[in-house]
Image (tube, grey):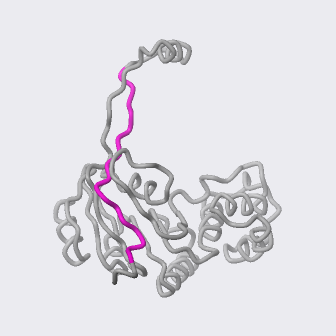
């Protein structure tokens, strides 16, 4: 990386705190009254504290840690879903977030309508998404269900459709949170091949997974988070064995 080739992602001393109410109310009405009277007190729960790293062009950056370590919160900050409480994040280029596949779909709309809606929310042109919809559905193996309301879809079908929409274009940054096990073996192979193709074309990938073998296999570097703090940042060959030893 040179001065003319800055990192795709710059994370500088970020911290994020969630506000938790200290006041318990028996009903929503009681809570609303307290809120209007400014009688609700909050405490801060720090999900991330002073986290810093860079991700370069074409790099696969793995993130490991136990449940509650702050991994998903970090992914949402990179995907521009949540702003950090402190610090700054610079993401250069378009982001394709694969955090909760299908979470933004409208159950009463058809797959076609959801493809257009979801693609638009990701910053793509609605007309282009309408034209791409048959190919997106076919790649997910759902071409026969394009005009069916997705309330009739299984969880696996929804995830496959969400993956196909999110990866139908070449983003600069791909954020992947535990979604590489979507669908059957054949679809998992297709998914990994598509991601690998993106990496070869220069896409940077931030990958969260409890599958430590996958982190070791595909990542260039790995970050170990523990209770919101950076425990270790190094090669997967160094980070994964150290983390695995504490997880026994």
Tell me where residue 120 sits by quadrant. bottom right
* Above or below, 109 relative to 192: above
Residue 247, horizontal then vertical, whole percent:
21, 60
Q: Residue at x 39, y 49 (%)?
A: 84
In the rendered view, does 242 fall on the left or right side of 55? Answer: left
In the rendered view, does 87 fall on the left or right side of 170? Answer: left
**Which residue is most to the right?**
147
Number of numbered discs visible in the structure rendering: 0
Residue 94, horizontal then vertical, whole percent:
55, 69
In the rendered view, does 27 fall on the left or right side of 102? Answer: left
Residue 48, horizontal then vertical, whole percent:
31, 49
Residue 49, horizontal then vertical, whole percent:
27, 49
In the image, which residues are magenta?
6-22
Q: Residue at x 36, y 66 (%)?
A: 10
Tell me where residue 3 sits by quadrant. bottom left
Between 8 and 142, the one lying in front of the other is: 8
SS assignment for the magenta stretch, majority: strand
Q: Residue at x 44, y 73 (%)?
A: 205
In the rendered view, does 240 fall on the left or right side of 94? Answer: left
Q: Residue at x 53, y 76 (%)?
A: 188
- Image quadrant holding the C terminus, namely bottom left
Between 240 and 34, the one lying in front of the other is: 34
- Image quadrant holding the N terminus, namely bottom left
* Above or below, 36 relative to 57: above
């Amino acid at each position: 990386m040179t001065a003319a080739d800055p990192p795709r992602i710059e994370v500088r001393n970020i911290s994020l705190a969630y506000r938790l109410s200290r006041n318990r109310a028996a009903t929503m009405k009681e809570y609303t009254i307290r809120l209007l009277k400014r009688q609700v007190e909050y405490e801060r729960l720090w999900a991330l504290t002073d986290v810093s790293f860079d991700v370069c062009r074409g790099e696969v950056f793995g993130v490991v840690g136990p449940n509650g370590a702050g991994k998903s919160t970090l992914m949402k900050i990179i995907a521009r879903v949540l702003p950090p409480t402190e610090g700054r994040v610079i993401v250069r280029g378009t982001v394709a977030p694969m955090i909760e596949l299908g979470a933004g779909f409208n159950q009463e709309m058809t797959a076609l309508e959801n493809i257009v809606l979801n693609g638009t929310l990701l910053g793509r042109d609605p007309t282009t998404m309408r034209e791409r919809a048959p190919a997106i559905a076919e790649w997910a193996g759902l071409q026969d269900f394009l005009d069916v309301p997705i309330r009739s879809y299984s969880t696996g079908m929804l995830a496959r459709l969400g993956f196909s929409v999110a990866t139908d274009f070449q983003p600069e940054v791909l954020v992947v949170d535990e979604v590489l096990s979507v669908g059957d073996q054949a679809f998992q192979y297709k998914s990994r091949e598509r991601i690998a193709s993106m990496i070869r074309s220069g896409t940077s990938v931030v990958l969260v997974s409890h599958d430590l073998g996958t982190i070791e296999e595909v990542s260039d570097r790995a970050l170990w988070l523990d209770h919101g703090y950076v425990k270790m940042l190094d090669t997967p060959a160094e980070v994964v064995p150290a983390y695995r030893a504490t997880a026994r």
